[in-house]
Amino acid sequence: AKRGSPSGAGAGQSPQALATRLSNDSNTLAGLVTRMQTLLAQREDELKSTRSLYQHASRELDQSRQRLASASVNAAEVERLRQDLADTRSLLTQAENLAAQLRQQLAGAPDGNVMAKLRTDLDEALLQRDNYQKQVAEMQTQMKNMVGSDQVGSLTRELAASNDKANSLEIENNKLRYDIQKLRAELDRTRLFVEKVDDLPAAAKALYVELSKLESATPAELATEYERISQELRAAVIDRINFQTGSSRIDLDKVEEIRRAVQSSGDDSFFLVVGYASKSGDLATNRQLSADRATTIASVANFRKKSGQGVQAVFLSATDRFSPTDLATNQVCEIWEIRK
């Protein structure tokens, strides 16, 4: 694709010197993209580690909350268990005292009937003592395994801190992704964006010409014409990306959407990214912004495409064909797949 030099760029330089400078600039930009991708990979590893810690803390907190819920641990329940434990310990002491008294009485009893009665009472007292000992042990274990609200609070704070760190890393990593997206688009612009329609491949040029005839079409007429184009030119829109006013950035979910659309297309398909602008504001500014948007999409598609696929971007027009009332709807780029 051909692209005119910016006004004043290369003034006073020989063609060889200008070519050398542009090559150096391109290499510098490519190196910067590579370094930023390496940094992003490192930050992704850090984010993965933080997310793992967050998930571990989250599981611990869930388990603690489940134990807290199953044991009905609250101030009243803890107090009740403590009181039950104290009462049971008191009964255990009484049972032990009774058993000791019965042993003394048994040792000094001369009559066989009295001894038999005392032995029966002693057996019952010992059984009661054993039961109380078992209850004490069970309550001690239950209280030992309880999770107090202070422990849950500590885990909650740990979880919040881990989540905050992960969110912060994700925000920073997303910023890096957008920076890389912008730099890669700048690096790809001379290869992917076409200034003159005659520089497009024949099939893409034919599509461009057909689309340029549809400026006055209504949305319903557009649908009919797009179906005709699909039949005659084997071309169809596989994705449509709208943009915020003044922005050429593609949201990360849209990047994934473009990747899926490209990967699911034909192995030798050609993609033409067609940029439009709304009719509000300055035409030259809108044209430049639309070109940036189309180039960014083409750069994303080019990075994700299959080896046999091709892609280029072009600006078509300022338009209201998609909506005469909602101007933002016309701030859009279409990705057309041309099938061979």
Image (cartoon, rainbow, N blue to C red):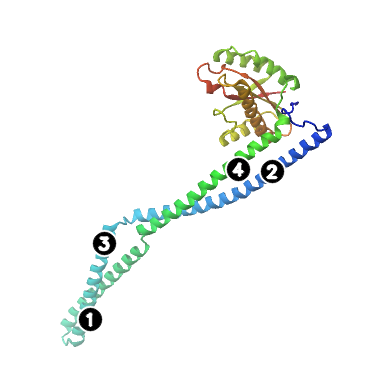
Q: Which comes before the other along the chain, label 4 or label 1? A: 1
Q: In the rendered view, tell whether residue 251 sits above or below residue 114.
A: above
Q: Amino acid at mark 2?
A: Leu
Q: Which residue is label 3 attached to?
A: 79
Which mark is in front, 3 or 4?
4
Q: Residue at x 69, y 43 (%)?
A: 32
The kind of secondary structure element at disc 1 is helix
**Around disc 1, counting alpha carbons within 10 Å, would you say few (fewer than 14), some (14 to 19), or many (20 or more)?**
some
Foreground residue among 225 and 333:
333
Q: Given contact means CB atoms under 8 Å apart, are the residues at marks 3 and 4 in contact? A: no
Q: Is residue 340 left or right of residue 239?
A: right
Q: Which residue is label 1 attached to?
A: 100
Q: Which comes before the other along the chain, label 2 or label 3? A: 2
Q: Which residue is label 4 attached to?
A: 176
Q: Which comes before the other along the chain, label 1 or label 3? A: 3
Work out how far the residue at label 1 is from the one at label 2, CA to CA, in angstroms.
Answer: 88 Å
Q: Which residue is label 2 attached to?
A: 32
Q: Amino acid at mark 1?
A: Ala
Horizontal and vertical percent position of residue 317? 63, 19
Work out how far the residue at label 2 is from the one at label 3, CA to CA, in angstroms.
Answer: 65 Å
Q: Residue at x 61, y 20 (%)?
A: 283
Q: Given contact means CB atoms under 8 Å apart, are the residues at marks 1 and 2 in contact? A: no
Q: Amino acid at mark 3?
A: Glu
**Around disc 2, counting alpha carbons within 10 Å, would you say few (fewer than 14), some (14 to 19), or many (20 or more)?**
some
Work out how far the residue at label 2 is from the one at label 4, CA to CA, in angstroms.
Answer: 12 Å
Work out how far the residue at label 3 is from the one at label 4, CA to CA, in angstroms.
Answer: 54 Å
Quadrant location of the N terminus? top right
